[in-house]
Amino acid sequence: MAQRRWWVLGATAVFVLLMASGGAASPFTFMPADPYDATPDAVPTPNFNNDGGGCCDLFDAHNTIAGTGFTSNADMDQFFLEPDHPWQLFSSPGTVALIGLTASNTNSLGLYTDLATGGGKSVVLGPHSGFQILSPFEGATFSVAGQFGWYLQSNQTFYYSDSALNTGGWDHMVTYSLAHLAGVVITVDFGSGAVSYQLSKNAVLIGWEDLPFSSGKLGDEDFDDMMYILDSVSVPEPAMLLLLGIGLVGAAFRLRRR
């Protein structure tokens, strides 16, 4: 188990997360900015406290990871990332850590490699039923070459990280940076028992809405139906910044050799 732990932790150390720049498409074409946020900031804020029993919203996931005292999804706006598709490993192929936090409605999470059609699917986590913050978190690792997207399978329905592949073009996925939590240690079971896992500056929190558009809303607009951490991946970046990232990795390697 110790060998597996160091293999997983080592895998996260060799990647740099670079977010795409340039103009960003509206992430929620169905939802105006700040619908559940009293402080205008032009960031769409998912619904919260609508599932009963106090569990589990996006801000609850952050509180569990970081020990913060957030009280609404509006507290997450400051970490919102857009665009969040497509994705690719910084070093391709490579290995990343995927850490499941919640799942409901017998959901499965996977990736697809045919960006045009959503084909080439591979399940990574699930299926799961129930709805709670997992303890310990569930982990998985995967390798994939080139660009890919995420999909959520809810019963017999598929939702994609590329909203163009979804019915009506609706965006069912949100992404938040967890760079501010670099160094935080969480407990994860990667299949061989619980181990300590240290988040890198590359970690992101991703949430899904698993209900279809109906009556002017995308499901219940809470995006907490499956939440997970993804660590040590990148989305496409302009060539200059990509070269800069490669240079940083090379510099770190040279310093280690010294």
Image (cartoon, rainbow, N blue to C red):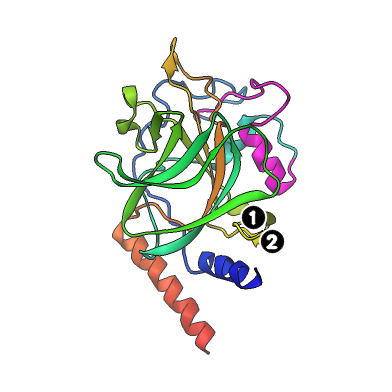
Identified at 62% across, 67% down, the residue is 5
Residue at 61% of width from left, 35% of height from top? 58
Rendered image quadrant of residue 121: top left
For marks 1 and 2, give the CA distance: 9 Å
- Is 181 positioned to the left or the right of 10 in the image? right
For the residue pair 4 and 183, the one nearer the viewer reads as: 4
User: Does the image show residue 183?
Assistant: no
**Relative vertical location of residue 73 with respect to residue 66 in this rendering, above or below:** above
Numbered label tally: 2
> Who is closer to the viewer here, 199 or 34?
199
Q: Which part of the image, by quadrant, shows the N terminus?
A: bottom right
User: Could you tell me which secondary element the residue under label 2 belongs to?
Assistant: strand
Looking at the image, is mark 1 or mark 2 earlier in the sequence? 1
**Residue 99's x, y, as percent?**
57, 50
Question: Badge 1, how many Cα within 10 Å: few under 14, some, many 20+?
Answer: some
The amino acid sitting under disc 2 is Ser
Q: Are marks 1 and 2 in contact (CB under 8 Å)?
A: no
Up-down: is 232 above or below 250? Answer: above
Decide whether residue 233 is among the magenta residues. no
In percent of width and height, residue 143 lies at 41, 60
Amino acid type indicated by mark 1: Asp
User: Is 12 left or right of 183, judged from the image as shown?
Assistant: left
Q: Give coordinates of residue 120: x percent, y percent.
A: 30, 47
Span highlighted in magenta in the image = 42-68
Q: Which residue is mark 2?
A: 196
Q: Residue tagged by mark 1?
A: 189
Residue at 43% x, 44% y: name it.
110
Query: Image quadrant of residue 199?
Result: bottom right
